[in-house]
Image (cartoon, coloured by chain):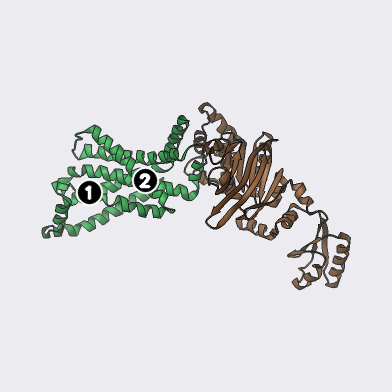
Chain colours: A brown, B green
């Protein structure tokens, strides 16, 4: 596989703030590459530098061999960009928006109608082609924005938080579409703070925190970093008193939400016995108890030190679903 | 390459005209403002109506371009739509030319309507048509570019409107300076003359009625759209 995106010490500073800090990476042609990290990690800034919306302060980057500093028009010809906020023109219809984008990306005139029709069909927008973009639901706006980014058949599709704010069905349908798109040979570069999404979708993931890449690997290899660690999920009929949780922390890190506890342990059998006696001692009745394999989230927490709650809060704040 | 850039200019121009400029509220504002201005001066000096025609056309060109151009670019910056253009494989110059031409075409159309009204109803004639058209084109281009300059200097739409006022209002006295063969100084002297006092008292009332009617008309057009 050839590297289609390469960056060398790519850096972006805003006054004293270093948004992206000497970032070096390679993305292979045809893969789905995920940028995983909390808000403010530098994910969007990296995309903005790669597509020519922001000039790097330092370092270099190439897209399909074109230097993003010197050959930005060639770079723009071979990339499609779906920003976090759907930003087509509210005042134009879906059809007019796509026709405008086809014109801006120099799609041959005799192909425009066929391409637009085909994209509208693919994204289930054929019956809404005459609707004003501003009047569409968030999910339909997202689909129309992705359709617009694909109008010129780019080699690389950049998506910034593609499922943010989408309902479960729309998010799932979008993920399936991205998988199908990958089969046509398009390289997909996406940013997300949904750990499950990155796990399901990406061939490789780069974990980025404070502008620096902490790890780049396949989801399986990242999870292997936390091999030997298990999570026991246990639900009781009533919530556990916070002061009693200290007893369990001797066996591993404890997280609690409502009636459920998650305990990160290394010795499963010993911990299960301890939990049973803990329940008896405090008069708690166990509803269910599960032993979970380490997840990408566990790997993320171990590698970055960023608590999964932080990511969860972001998810809730954005009102989205993964 | 040049063909691609020209195609980019063309598409941006068409998009802006369709999405922003040729909307009933914008057209009505572009036409109504100079007409109201003309009416205000005509009420003071009914005999000088024909003399107002050049100022009327100039006002239409000025107000039709500067403010609209500034608002359109600032609005697109605000909602992120301008980034959509920057991501396209065209140069920044192409984007700017497309944007400026959009405002200029709108100003040209509004000024054209004013010219037509002047020719049909004010009994005026254009002595040098080629010179008139050349100057008009240069005027709308210059004012549209001024609007773009205002837009890149601010972040919010209301800031664009405020800042563009500093550019568009100072030329207004100049636009009507030839009322009744009088200079600006002479005109202002007449306004202060005691014998005009009774008529001046009626002006605010008439202006208020007309302004209310205009607002109602704009609201009705906006609602119907």
Residue at image location 42% in from the left, 53% down from the top: B154
Q: Do labels 1 and 2 share a chain?
A: yes
Residue at image location 49% in from the left, 49% down from the top: B79
Task: Choose between A32 and A49: the one closer to the eye.
Answer: A49
User: What is the secondary structure assignment of the residue under circle 2?
Assistant: helix
Residue at image location 43% in from the left, 34% down from the top: B10
Q: Position of residue A245 (x, y in %)?
A: 78, 69
Q: In which quarter of the image is residue A263?
A: bottom right
Q: In whole angstroms, how far apart are the C-alphas of marks 1 and 2?
A: 24 Å
Q: In the rendered image, which residue does mark 2 sit on?
A: B26
Residue at image location 14% in from the left, 53% down from the top: B186
Q: Where is residue A118 in the image (x, y as percent from the top left)?
A: 59, 32
Q: Can residue A123 be seen in this view?
A: no
In the drawing, does residue A253 fall left or right of residue A98?
Answer: right
In the drawing, does residue B36 fall left or right of residue B3?
Answer: left
Q: Compared with residue A98, is residue A85 higher up or lower down, i.e. above or below?
A: below
Q: In the rendered image, which residue does mark 1 sit on?
A: B174
Task: Choose between B27 and A48: the one closer to the eye.
Answer: A48
Q: Where is residue A196 in the image (x, y as percent from the top left)?
A: 71, 50
Q: Quadrant of residue B58?
A: top left
Q: Which residue lies furthest to the top in this view?
A: A110
What label does residue B108 carry, if any? Answer: none
Q: Can residue B219 be seen in this view?
A: yes
Q: Compared with residue B109, is residue A198 higher up or lower down, i.e. above or below?
A: below
């Amino acid at each position: 596989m050839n590297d289609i995106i390469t960056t060398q010490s790519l850096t972006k500073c805003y006054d004293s703030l270093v948004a992206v800090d000497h970032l070096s990476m390679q993305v292979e042609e045809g893969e789905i590459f995920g940028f995983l990290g909390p808000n403010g990690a530098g994910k969007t800034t990296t995309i903005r530098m790669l597509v020519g919306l922001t000039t790097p302060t330092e370092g270099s980057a190439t897209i399909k061999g074109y230097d993003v500093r010197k050959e930005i028009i060639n770079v723009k010809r071979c990339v499609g960009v779906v920003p976090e906020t759907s930003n087509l023109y509210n005042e134009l219809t879906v059809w007019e928006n796509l026709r405008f984008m086809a014109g801006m990306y120099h799609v041959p005139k005799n192909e425009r109608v066929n391409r637009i029709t085909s994209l509208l069909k693919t994204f289930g927008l054929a019956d809404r082609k005459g609707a004003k973009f501003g009047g569409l639901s968030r999910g339909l706006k997202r689909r129309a924005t992705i359709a617009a980014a694909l109008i010129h058949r780019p080699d690389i599709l950049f998506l910034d938080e593609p499922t943010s704010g989408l309902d479960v069905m729309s998010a799932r349908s979008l993920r399936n579409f991205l998988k199908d798109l990958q089969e046509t040979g398009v390289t997909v570069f996406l940013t997300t703070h949904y750990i499950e999404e990155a796990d399901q979708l990406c061939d490789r993931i780069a974990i980025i925190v404070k502008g620096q890449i902490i790890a780049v690997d396949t989801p399986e290899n990242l999870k292997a970093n936390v091999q030997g660690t298990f999570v026991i999920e246990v639900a009781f009929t009533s919530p556990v008193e916070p002061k009693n949780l200290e007893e369990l922390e001797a066996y591993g890190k404890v997280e609690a939400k409502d009636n459920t506890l998650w305990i990160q342990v290394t010795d499963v059998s010993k911990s299960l016995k301890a939990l049973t006696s803990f329940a008896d001692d405090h008069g708690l009745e166990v509803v269910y108890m599960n032993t979970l394999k380490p997840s990408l989230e566990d790997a993320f927490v171990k590698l970055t030190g960023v608590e999964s709650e932080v990511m969860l809060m972001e998810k809730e704040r954005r009102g989205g679903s993964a | 390459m040049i063909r691609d850039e020209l195609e980019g200019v063309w598409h941006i121009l068409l998009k802006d005209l369709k999405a922003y400029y040729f909307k009933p509220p914008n057209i009505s504002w572009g036409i109504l403002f100079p007409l109201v201005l003309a009416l205000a001066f005509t009420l003071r000096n009914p005999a000088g109506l024909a003399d107002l025609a050049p100022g009327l056309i100039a006002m239409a060109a000025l107000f039709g371009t500067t403010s609209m151009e500034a608002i359109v670019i600032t609005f697109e910056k605000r909602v992120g739509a301008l980034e959509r253009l920057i991501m396209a494989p065209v140069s920044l110059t192409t984007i700017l030319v497309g944007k400026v031409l959009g405002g200029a075409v709108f100003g040209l159309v509004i000024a054209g309507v004013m010219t037509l009204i002047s020719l049909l109803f004010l009994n005026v004639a254009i002595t040098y048509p080629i010179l008139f058209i050349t100057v008009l084109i240069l005027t709308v281009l210059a004012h549209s570019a001024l609007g773009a300059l205002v837009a890149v200097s601010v972040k919010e739409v209301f800031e664009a409107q405020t800042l563009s006022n500093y550019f568009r209002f100072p030329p207004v006295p100049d636009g009507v300076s030839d009322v009744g063969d009088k200079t600006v100084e002479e005109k202002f002297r007449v306004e202060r003359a005691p014998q005009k006092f009774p008529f001046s008292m009626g002006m605010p009332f008439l202006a208020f009625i007309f302004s209310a009617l205009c607002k109602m008309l704009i609201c009705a057009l906006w609602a119907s759209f």
